Amino acid sequence: FILLLDFSLAALAAFGVDKLTRPLADIEQQWFGSLLKVLTWGIGGLIVIAGPLSYYAMLVTQDRNPAIFNRAIGAASGVAFFALFAVAGLVVLHLIRANRLRGFNAGLAVIVVIALDLFTLGYNVDVGHTNPVAGFDHPDAIAFLKNDPNLYRLEVTTDVWHAWQPDTALLHQEFDAWGLYNPLTLADTTLYWSGAPPRSTGRYNLLGIKYIIASKAGAPADGNIVSVFEGDPQINIYLNQDALARVLFVGQSTVVADHDAAWEAIRADSFDPATTVVLEGGQSLDTQPNSTLAIIDYTIHRVVVAVETDQPGYLVLSDAYYPGWRATIDQQPATIERANYAFRAVYVPEGQHTVEFVFNPPIWQIGLAVSGVTALVLLGWAGWRWKKTA
């Protein structure tokens, strides 16, 4: 999102600079003049109000906590820099409006103001004397994890985030129960995880957390956990011996009335995800199937599982339930049920079957169509402009 936003702002700025270096039509001159008046009065009024207030805040906090005083100084400095570059920008725009700056000189003046603004406020951001990627460098620990071919998740305890950066698993194509270190998270899975399930509960083991990255102080005490790797100078890797597989086949299902009821059901002490799935739809089952599962393919947008069972049951995948996922059984459409509050399940009859999950939301097709039409319109407009100026 940040990269797209920055690119869009840069593209708009480039378009604006290009526009300012060319002669404006009469109607554009009128619009430019009106906009400049609004900006001048608006920014001027803002400076007149914010300037004295920020200076006053700095004066009245001199005898307070140094942290508060430093914040007041920072706020006053921010207002001063804003005023300086806002006035500089307005001066340049007024000179362009009065035809005092034209063509190359107009573009150069705008670029100088922007460059000075970015440099003076950003040259000292994120400056440090430590290696910023050191927390991602754990070759021996990663090699240990890579030697396990099974599908599992990691948990990184928060007390070692300074040593093992939260997105380290992503860089090495491992699965972390915390997901991405990103504010854009899914509500249900975030609540499930932030509910802090004790490591001794089925609710925790359902996540398939096989390995725990923690400090060298010892294994977490709230589960059947032992140390299996101590070859890293900063962290140990511990094995959760009760971790469940990421894909399960269960013969018992409990159908609840709504989403809140599902939350209460999975928090019950009796909840055992190894044998029972809590559903918000589907059908109640009470069987004890003998089944075998084999993961044929697992990617971020496609999961294929071979199932062989002597009785019907539910194939439970401890991945997030989210609109856009589609399921098939032997290439025939199947219904995905919301399972265990935040995950996915599909009813599978007895026999040998191939179950496939594919992420293919309709909004992607809509977005692709809109993007395609927009691209064609822009190409047509560019061709029309080229012919008109030729």
Image (tube, grey):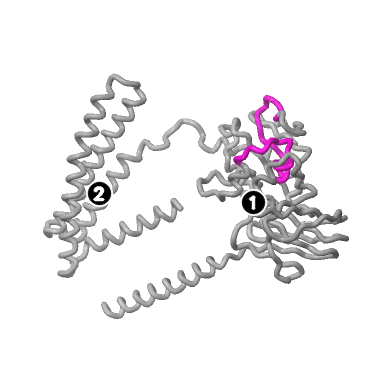
**Helix, strand or loop at mark 1:** loop
Residue linked to disc 2: 112
Report crowding for label 1: few under 14, some 14 to 19, many 20 or more residues within 10 A (C-alpha).
Answer: many
| Residue drawn at x 31%, y 25% as measured from the top left | 69
| Residue drawn at x 15%, y 65% as measured from the top left | 30
Mark 1 or mark 2: which comes first in sequence?
2
Instruction: Please state the horizontal and vertical placement of residue 107, each as a whole percent of the image.
Output: 23, 56
Residue that sits furthest to the top in the current view: 63
| Residue drawn at x 77%, y 52% as measured from the top left | 248
Q: Amino acid at mark 2?
A: Val
Q: Which mark is residue 342?
A: 1
Looking at this view, is 218 or 340 the one in front?
340
Instruction: Please state the horizontal and vertical placement of residue 271, each as a whole percent of the image.
Output: 74, 44
Disc nearest the viewer among 1 and 2: 1
Residue that sits furthest to the front in the current view: 257
Distance from label 1 to label 2 (Cα)? 52 Å
Looking at this view, is 214 or 379 the one in front?
214
Q: Over which residues does the magenta segment extend?
A: 194-220
Write down the quadrant of residue 374 in the picture. bottom left
Question: Does the magenta portion include 107?
Answer: no
- State how many labels appear: 2
Write down the quadrant of residue 35 in the picture. bottom left
Left or right of residue 37, residue 1 in this image: right
| Residue drawn at x 57%, y 38% as measured from the top left | 165
**Helix, strand or loop at mark 2:** helix
